[in-house]
């Protein structure tokens, strides 16, 4: 697991930790799904390239994406608590089965632009970190995300009403709340299973990122993309508390500096990926982060956007508040809700 060899004694720490002062340290990391933009562009390079280079070789990490290890991402928080890995990248909505609070800043459709998504999670940072430290032997280090979570369908979708009666792959309860409001059937399914399920007609549509689906091969089994957003697949970087507390203070300070830069980079990547997604999916340049594909993007009509807003303010917030409880909803109203101008029912 986490190993450490003490190097030369440092005379002190400046704000920017000197790489030559760092003791040799190696980490075990389990990361996000490998086909996602967050994994490809940010997470894996951070552990394999950025940290070793910035530390002059003192810090190294063995990172493996969870899908390459055959791990169900719903179990990642439990594995982190046990110390199976030192650091983990996790989708917060997948953690919500253990505590509904975790999905509080990525409820389906509550934000429609990246800056608001980040602001909502920043408002909720202390709540998620508190719950991690209190119940999961873990500490929150960073928030990131993926391009908007949208509908990819086997056939040519006409609009929102066409989803009624269809089987739609989702990956969290808040998406289930949304689909229930439009009369669709939500089907929970791991990311790696979706392409064959779409190909074989097990599901009619699937929800994932507008570029994450592209890099994972979804255009090969779908004809249309309906860009009504159901969230951002917000992820976190977290560390096992026992692993963190064993670290030399110099390493802790170095990591905190590097993680702040990493978090900023993830949000920059998210914006770039969001901007490029339509190009990649319709065979146009620039498309530097995905693969050129040819599917039909079905525009969201003004009336459908209004329906989306009503579903978020009704079914989505009501469903989550019921799972989380009145005290939890009140805390959300004073943090995320206050930031975004939304309110969850507290009774």
Image (spheres, helix red, strand yellow):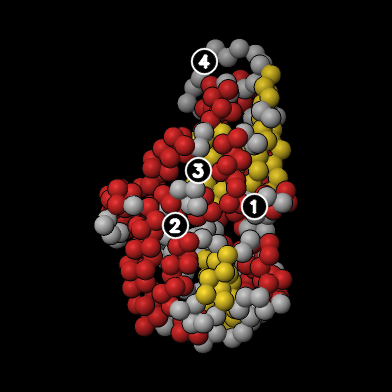
Q: Which residue is mark 4?
A: 12
Circle 3: is it few (<14), some (14-19), or many (20+) Cα within 10 Å?
many
Q: Are marks 2 and 1 in contact (CB under 8 Å)?
A: no
Residue 40 is situated, as x and y percent measured from the top left of the image, at 66, 54
Work out whether mark 4 precedes mark 3 in sequence or the reverse, and give the earlier one: 4
Work out whether mark 2 precedes mark 1 in sequence or the reverse, and give the earlier one: 1
- Residue at image point 50% right, 85% down: 162
Residue 1 is situated, as x and y percent measured from the top left of the image, at 69, 30
Residue 139 is situated, as x and y percent measured from the top left of the image, at 49, 36
Q: CA distance from mark 4 to mark 3?
A: 26 Å
- Residue at image point 50% right, 37% down: 136
Circle 1: is it few (<14), some (14-19), or many (20+) Cα within 10 Å?
few
Work out whether mark 3 precedes mark 2 in sequence or the reverse, and give the earlier one: 2
Circle 2: is it few (<14), some (14-19), or many (20+) Cα within 10 Å?
many
Disc 4 or disc 1, which is closer to the eye? 1
- Residue at image point 26% right, 57% down: 347
Disc 4 or disc 3, which is closer to the eye? 3
- Nearest the eye: 172 or 335: 172
Q: Are marks 3 and 2 in contact (CB under 8 Å)?
A: no
Disc 4 or disc 2, which is closer to the eye? 2
Question: Regarding mark 4 in the picture, which secondary structure is present there?
Answer: loop
Residue 316 visible to an observer of this rendering: yes
Please give the label number shown on residue 106: 2
Please give the label number shown on residue 72: 1
Disc 2 or disc 1, which is closer to the eye? 1
Q: CA distance from mark 1 to mark 3?
A: 21 Å
Q: Quadrant of residue 28?
A: top right
Q: Which residue is mark 3?
A: 142
Question: Regarding mark 1 in the picture, which secondary structure is present there?
Answer: loop
Disc 1 or disc 3, which is closer to the eye? 1
Q: CA distance from mark 3 to mark 2?
A: 15 Å
């Amino acid at each position: 697991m986490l190993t450490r060899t003490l190097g030369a004694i440092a005379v002190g720490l400046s704000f920017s930790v000197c790489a030559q002062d760092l003791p040799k340290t190696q980490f075990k990391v389990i990361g996000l799904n490998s086909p996602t933009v967050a994994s490809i562009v940010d997470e894996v390079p951070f552990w394999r390239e950025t940290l070793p280079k910035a530390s002059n070789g003192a810090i190294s990490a063995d990172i493996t994406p969870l899908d390459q290890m055959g791990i169900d991402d719903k179990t990642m928080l439990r594995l982190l608590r046990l110390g199976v890995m030192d650091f983990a990248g996790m989708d917060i909505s997948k953690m919500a089965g253990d505590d509904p609070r975790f999905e509080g800043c990525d409820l389906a459709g509550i934000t429609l632009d990246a800056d608001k998504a980040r602001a909502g999670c920043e408002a909720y940072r202390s709540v998620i970190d508190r719950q991690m430290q209190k119940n999961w032997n873990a500490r929150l280090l960073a928030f990131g995300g993926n391009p908007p979570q949208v509908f990819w369908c086997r056939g040519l979708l006409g609009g929102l009403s066409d989803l009624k009666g269809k089987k739609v792959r989702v990956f969290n309860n808040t998406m289930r709340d949304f689909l229930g409001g439009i009369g669709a059937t939500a089907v929970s399914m791991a990311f790696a299973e979706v392409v064959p399920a779409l190909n074989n007609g097990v599901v009619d549509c699937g929800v994932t990122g507008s570029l994450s689906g592209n890099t994972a091969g979804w255009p090969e089994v779908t004809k249309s993309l309906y860009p009504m957003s159901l969230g951002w697949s917000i992820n976190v970087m977290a560390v096992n508390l026992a692993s963190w507390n064993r670290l030399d203070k110099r390493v802790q300070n170095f990591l905190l500096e590097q993680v702040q830069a990493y978090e900023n980079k993830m949000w920059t990547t998210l914006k770039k990926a969001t901007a490029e997604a339509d190009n990649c999916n319709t065979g146009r340049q620039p498309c530097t982060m995905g693969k050129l594909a040819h599917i039909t993007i079905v525009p969201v009509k003004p009336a459908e956007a209004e329906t989306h807003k009503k579903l978020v303010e009704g079914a989505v917030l009501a469903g989550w508040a019921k799972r989380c409880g009145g005290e939890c909803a009140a805390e959300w109203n004073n943090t995320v809700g206050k930031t975004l101008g939304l309110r969850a029912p507290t009774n």
